[in-house]
Amino acid sequence: MSSQPKPQILFRREEIAATVARLAAEVTKDYKDRRPLLLGILTGSFVFMADLIRLLDFPLEVEFLQVSSYGRGRESSGRIKVVKGVSSPIKGRDVLVIEDIVDTGLTIAFLLDYLRKKKPASLKLCALTDKPSRRQVPVTIDYLGFTVPNKFLVGYGIDWDEKFRNLPDICFVEGED
Ligand code: PRP
């Protein structure tokens, strides 16, 4: 796609807020006495993480981890590596991974494997969106916001070629996917 696409709204900010509140209630029920480590996957999860943790009224820690999985275009390269690892101890912790989107599943499958080797007490996944039509490897999402169609999402932290992360709604851009 050569020209910049025009994003169209898929989920408005009010619907996102209600969904994040629902997820926060589910997470609170399971983690309120466990001082979990919430591990956000950069960059796309930062807006979701910021909204989610402000609804969690119990002790927790936050860290971010970065992998490279997509190039600057729209297709997964399938090649994944950890760019910024975790500095907090993982062993024996209750770790909740926070993702903005599970698409092919390659990124999160790699990451959960990477984290499992560090021997957490528990390891679960909270994803704002899930695009099951694109899945290449099985992934269990323990806390899910939205199941989404096979469209390229942008906004609320999610980018298209590093653009549109600042849109307050979850949108999509047209084009082949
Ligand atoms: C996105 C998203 C997930 C991954 C999902 O990240 O945040 O980490 O792709 O795709 P997959 O299920 O096909 O592996 P991206 O690599 O675009 O980086 P970003 O978060 O920095 O935008």
Image (spheres, grey):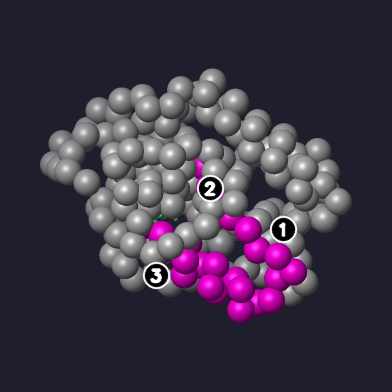
Q: Residues within 10 Å of mark 2 (few under 14, many from 20)?
A: many
Image location (x, y in percent) of residue 21 = 65, 31
Q: Is residue 47 above or below residue 84?
A: above
Given the current orientation, which residue lies at the most extreme right position? 33
Q: Is residue 76 left or right of residue 157?
A: left
Q: Which mark is first along the chain, 3 or 2?
A: 3
Image location (x, y in percent) of residue 158 = 42, 42
Q: Alpha carbon of mark 2 to alpha carbon of mark 3: how far? A: 19 Å
Find numbered disc 1 in the image and state the secondary structure of the residue it sits on.
Answer: strand
Which region is colored magenta?
104-128
The amino acid at mark 1 is Leu
Res 40 seen here: no
Q: Nearer the viewer, residue 93 or 25?
A: 25
Q: Which mark is first along the chain, 1 or 3?
A: 1
The amino acid at mark 3 is Ile
Q: Residue at the location (39% across, 64% down)?
A: 137
Q: Which mark is first along the chain, 2 or 1?
A: 1
Please give the count of numbered marks on the rendered protein.
3
Question: Where ligand 1 lies, by image quadrant?
Answer: bottom left
Mark 3 and ligand 1: say if the CB distance to the nearest ligand atom is below 8 Å: yes
Q: Are marks 3 and 1 in contact (CB under 8 Å)?
A: no
Quadrant of the image for the N terminus? top left
Q: Alpha carbon of mark 1 to alpha carbon of mark 2: how far? A: 15 Å
Check residue 62 in the rendering and tell me which mark sits there, or answer none.
none
Q: Which residue is mark 1?
A: 37
Q: Which residue is mark 3?
A: 80
Find numbered disc 3 in the image and state the secondary structure of the residue it sits on.
Answer: strand
Q: Residue at the location (69% across, 61% down)?
A: 95
Q: Is residue 37 left or right of residue 169?
A: right
Image location (x, y in percent) of residue 111 = 51, 67
Quadrant of the image occupied by residue 118:
bottom right
